[in-house]
Image: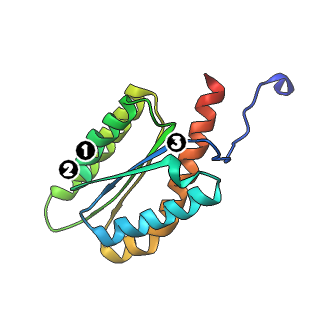
């Protein structure tokens, strides 16, 4: 019975895809590391640098609004959110990390534009530094794969 199913294989070909990236400047060293991983992987997947738009925002809570504006423009096949929220000594960490993630998910579901969420939430700087380049690359892969999937599903 399963041999009659239609299945879409993951496609990581980035040629002719337009990708928007929003990066938080707070924890900028980690943001730059995430961006480095994203940039390298997008190029490897065939996304032309001229098809990538980067904007920066002050912090993680500002990411969803920039993503929403980019998604509503209909100029992008997928978006990528980059940033880092590092636990401090106050409850602020939970608010920022939860609300940032909720906002990113809301934008994706409301607009139908896929968003790869690479906003790291870690206990300390060291954890973020270890993960940043790999997570940036994974976000690029997710964005390209989801952009291609959305084209096939439509």
Whether tag 3 and tag 2 are in contact, CB under 8 A, the answer is: no
Rounded to the nearest angstrom, the CA distance separating label 1 from label 3 is: 27 Å
Whether tag 1 and tag 2 are in contact, CB under 8 A, the answer is: yes
Q: Residue at x 49, y 40 (%)?
A: 78
Q: Residue at x 52, y 36 (%)?
A: 77
Colour scheme used in the picture? rainbow
Residue 25 at x, y percent in the picture: 26, 62
Q: Residues within 10 Å of mark 1 (few under 14, many from 20)?
A: some
Residue matched to label 1: 99
Numbered tag placed on residue 52 in the rendering: none
Instruction: Tell me the mark number nearer the camera, choosing from 3 and 2.
Output: 3
Rounded to the nearest angstrom, the CA distance separating label 1 from label 2 is: 6 Å
Rounded to the nearest angstrom, the CA distance separating label 3 from label 2 is: 31 Å
- Per the image, label 2 sits on a secondary structure element best described as helix
Residue matched to label 3: 18
- The mark that comes first in sequence, 1 or 3, is 3
Quadrant of the rendering where the C terminus is positioned:
top right
Depth check: give the residue in front, 122 or 36.
36
Residue matched to label 2: 95
Quadrant of the rendering where the N terminus is positioned:
top right
Q: Residue at x 55, y 48 (%)?
A: 142
């Amino acid at each position: 019975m399963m041999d009659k199913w239609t299945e879409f294989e993951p496609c990581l070909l980035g040629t002719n895809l337009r990708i928007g990236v929003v990066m938080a400047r707070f924890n900028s060293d980690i943001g730059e590391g995430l961006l480095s991983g994203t940039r390298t992987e997008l190029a490897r997947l065939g996304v032309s640098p001229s098809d990538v738009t980067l904007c920066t925002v002050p912090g993680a809570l500002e990411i969803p609004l920039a993503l929403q504006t980019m998604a509503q423009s209909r100029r992008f096949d997928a978006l990528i959110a980059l940033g880092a929220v590092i636990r401090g000594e106050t409850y602020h960490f939970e608010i920022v990390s939860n609300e940032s993630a909720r906002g990113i998910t809301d934008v994706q579901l409301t607009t139908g534009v896929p968003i790869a969420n690479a906003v790291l939430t870690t206990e300390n700087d060291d954890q973020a530094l270890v993960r940043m380049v790999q997570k940036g690359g994974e976000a690029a892969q997710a964005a390209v794969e989801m952009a291609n999937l959305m084209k096939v599903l439509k």
